[in-house]
């Protein structure tokens, strides 16, 4: 239950009687208003009828009713969200689950139809309790993060929200920071990671950071340095299993040919990419290419046999970080072999 | 060693609403209560002796010695004041320095010091983690005047703490309060609230009652150290505006903050200090787990409930209604007479 009170209670206690009472002035006649109210239902019935006719004519599904139902659901959800006003709760990180789930349908469409993501090993993600997902980072914009989140939410037997960690420089950007916070992301700071893990959340971290997203197309699928192993130390301290995740396909969405350093510095960005389409085609160049994606969740690496003090042992931490990196790199090569082609 | 119980308590800054509320609650719990401020209190309190004294002058030291004060509650710290930054600096840094000098005399009887600080000491910025714990003050960030002043003030307090081991020092970093007359409350109460485009920060608020309660608790009990104090949970800026019945209007450009502040000042008549502009852009949320553990107490109002209380206008009832000055004079007269009678009887 997100809101503290039910809608009935709110309506009874509301001081704004003007909103509850029908507004004065021009109103359409009653039959037309009834028709207006029922129009979506009639439209759906018509589409359903049409789809069954077409199926009997052609012998296959021309109109997928599920998709249409999803779009209708999306519209209704948005209307519901607009109606709840300030009566919803966010967690301490500013995460609004209802709002996030309403947008998931758009990401689901990208997941299934655009990038045709094939996910394996999603059962390795624990159904409850904390875990640290560690993934490779690629593509100029962090679409891989959104796809991992969508994968866990749609494919897992118990849908869970993944909380990704974001570089702090993105948290200062207007609109982006608002969207990231609202959909459950936190700052990539050891303190935030620890707090999220202590709340038994699934935390997604990209140890490569902008080194991974900002690498040129030439270097695709070659993992960068995994930070300084800070994610391993945090996982040991919080006693959270590490789940390595290999993502294949994200490298090809924006083939980055060059990086214009001076321009990046001018705008305060970590890099300024040049792709075959960006910045030549303007906003059209921001459309990612429809490459074929594969996401593999590997078996979790348990750290429960280690003591929290072991997090201070730099040698052990770096060794574990290298293990995780090897697992992800191997997973990338395996999945590249399984993929028939870049766009197939 | 017997546990110390406060006997003679001096409250600085009693004339602001929070000070008055603290005095009202403390009066029942300590035998002798003295208050000082530069302006007369809004309501008279029979159990309290009021002294007209400015913390910026060394008279405060004399006061502490003469009255044999054993507990000082320093509330004369301005954070959200309509006055200019110069006077905030004078009050916060010079005033605190004077109070500390007064407490630090070799023969001083002061055994407990409670200092009011503010969440503004952290200074909101996008590069911070989602929660501030007590050790995350950052000296590099010298942009905002109030943040710098509070940092200087806390520096003085911690130096005092190192030099005077006999004295327990409690620093309370109070969360942002939205009682009737704070800048944030006036900003949120606008019918159309200009917000920074593309930002919807988390706000963590502290109810006036909880602020008074935590100060009283740190006076009565022994809780040395620095504590973050704020209500549970967060409320988004857009939610807060919605609760107040206004509409957010993302009109202010996120860059060139001073220009936006000037615009808000001229068109809405609300002076927005730079630390507040940072807070309504990036948000400021503190981690209060130390408070919960050490005080074994949680604020009664969550951030959301604080906002609801403001919307209902309940905050006005928390504070005593101001009585006219004549009544105050009368109270003082009666108090003096009663005391004289007591002295004669002894």
Image: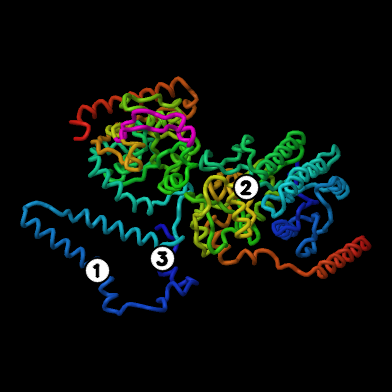
- State whether discs 1 and 2 lie on one chain: no
The residue pinned by badge 2 equals B274
Disc marking residue A39 = 1
The residue pinned by badge 3 equals A6
Farthest-out residue, front:
A280
Q: Is residue B288 visible?
A: no
Under tag 1, what secondary structure?
helix
Work out whether residue B250 or residue B87 is closer to the camera in this orientation and state it: B250
| Residue B168 coordinates in the image, percent (x, y) | 73, 41
Q: CA distance from mark 1 to mark 3?
A: 27 Å
- State whether discs 1 and 3 lie on one chain: yes
* Tag 1 near tag 3, CB within 8 Å: no
Residue A58 to residue A37: above or below = above
Under tag 3, what secondary structure?
loop
Say which label, 1 or 3, has the lower sequence index: 3
Query: Which quadrant of the rendered structure holds the N terminus of chain A?
Result: bottom left
* Chain name for mark 2: B
Q: Is residue A94 left or right of residue B34?
A: left
Work out whether residue B221 or residue B327 is closer to the camera in this orientation and state it: B327
- State whether discs 3 and 2 lie on one chain: no
Which region is colored magenta?
A253-276
Farthest-out residue, right:
B344
């Amino acid at each position: 239950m997100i809101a503290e009170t039910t809608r009935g209670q709110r309506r009874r206690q509301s001081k704004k009687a003007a909103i509850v009472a029908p507004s004065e002035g021009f109103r359409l006649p009653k039959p037309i208003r009834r028709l207006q109210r029922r129009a979506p239902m009639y439209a759906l019935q018509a589409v359903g009828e049409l789809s069954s006719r077409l199926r009997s004519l052609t012998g296959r599904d021309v109109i997928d009713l599920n998709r249409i139902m999803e779009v209708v659901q999306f519209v209704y959800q948005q209307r519901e969200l607009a109606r709840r006003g300030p009566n919803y709760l966010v967690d301490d990180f500013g995460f609004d689950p209802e709002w996030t789930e309403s947008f998931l349908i758009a990401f689901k469409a990208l997941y299934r139809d655009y990038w045709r993501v094939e996910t394996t090993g999603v059962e390795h993600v624990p159904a409850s309790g904390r875990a640290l997902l560690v993934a490779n980072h690629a593509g100029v914009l962090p679409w891989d993060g959104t796809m991992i989140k969508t994968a866990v939410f749609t494919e897992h037997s118990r849908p869970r929200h993944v909380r990704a960690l974001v570089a702090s420089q993105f948290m200062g950007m207007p609109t982006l920071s608002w969207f990231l916070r609202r959909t459950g992301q936190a700052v990539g700071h050891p303190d935030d990671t620890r707090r999220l893990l202590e709340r038994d959340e699934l935390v997604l971290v990209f140890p490569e950071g902008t080194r991974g997203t900002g690498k040129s197309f030439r270097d695709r699928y070659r993992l960068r340095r995994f930070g300084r192993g800070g994610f391993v130390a945090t996982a040991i301290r919080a006693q959270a299993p590490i789940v390595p995740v290999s993502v294949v396909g994200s490298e090809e969405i924006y083939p980055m040919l060059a990086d214009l350093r001076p321009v990046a510095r001018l705008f305060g960005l970590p890099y300024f990419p040049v792709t075959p389409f960006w910045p030549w085609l303007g906003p059209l160049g921001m459309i990612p290419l429809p490459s074929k994606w594969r996401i593999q969740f590997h078996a979790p690496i348990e750290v429960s046999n280690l003591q929290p003090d072991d997090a201070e042992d730099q040698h052990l931490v770096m060794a574990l970080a290298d293990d995780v990196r090897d697992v992800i790199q191997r997973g990338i090569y395996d999945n590249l072999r399984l993929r028939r082609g870049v766009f197939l | 060693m017997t546990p110390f119980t406060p006997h003679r308590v001096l409250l600085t800054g009693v004339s602001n609403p929070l000070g008055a509320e603290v005095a009202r609650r403390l009066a029942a719990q300590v035998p002798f209560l003295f208050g000082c401020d530069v302006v007369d209190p809004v309501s008279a309190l029979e159990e309290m002796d009021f002294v007209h004294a400015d913390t910026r002058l060394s008279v405060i030291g004399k006061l502490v010695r003469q009255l044999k004060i054993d507990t000082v509650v320093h509330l004369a710290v301005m954070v959200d004041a309509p006055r200019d930054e110069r006077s905030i600096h004078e009050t916060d840094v010079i005033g605190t320095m004077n109070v500390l000098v007064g407490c630090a005399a070799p023969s001083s009887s002061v055994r407990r010091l409670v200092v009011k600080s503010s969440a503004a000491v952290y200074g909101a910025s996008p590069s911070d983690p989602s929660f501030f714990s007590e050790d995350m003050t950052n000296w590099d960030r010298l942009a905002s005047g109030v943040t710098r002043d509070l940092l200087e003030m806390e520096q003085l307090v911690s130096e005092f703490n190192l030099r005077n081991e006999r004295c327990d020092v409690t620093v309370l970093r109070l969360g942002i309060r939205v009682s009737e007359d704070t800048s944030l409350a006036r900003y949120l109460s606008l019918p159309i609230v200009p917000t920074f485009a593309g930002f919807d920060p988390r706000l963590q608020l502290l109810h006036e009652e909880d602020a008074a309660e935590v100060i009283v608790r740190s006076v009565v009990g022994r809780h040395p150290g620095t504590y973050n104090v704020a209500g549970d949970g967060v409320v988004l800026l857009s939610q807060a505006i919605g609760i107040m019945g206004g509409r957010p209007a993302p009109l202010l450009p996120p860059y060139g903050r001073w220009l936006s502040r000037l615009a808000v000042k001229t068109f809405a008549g609300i002076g927005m200090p730079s630390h507040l502009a940072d807070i309504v852009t990036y948000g400021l949320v503190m981690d209060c787990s130390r408070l919960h553990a050490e005080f074994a107490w949680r604020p009664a109002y969550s951030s959301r409930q604080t906002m609801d209380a403001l919307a209902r206008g309940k905050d006005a009832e928390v504070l005593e209604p101001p009585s006219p000055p004549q009544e105050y004079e009368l109270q003082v007269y009666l108090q003096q007479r009663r005391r004289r009678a007591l002295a004669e009887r002894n």
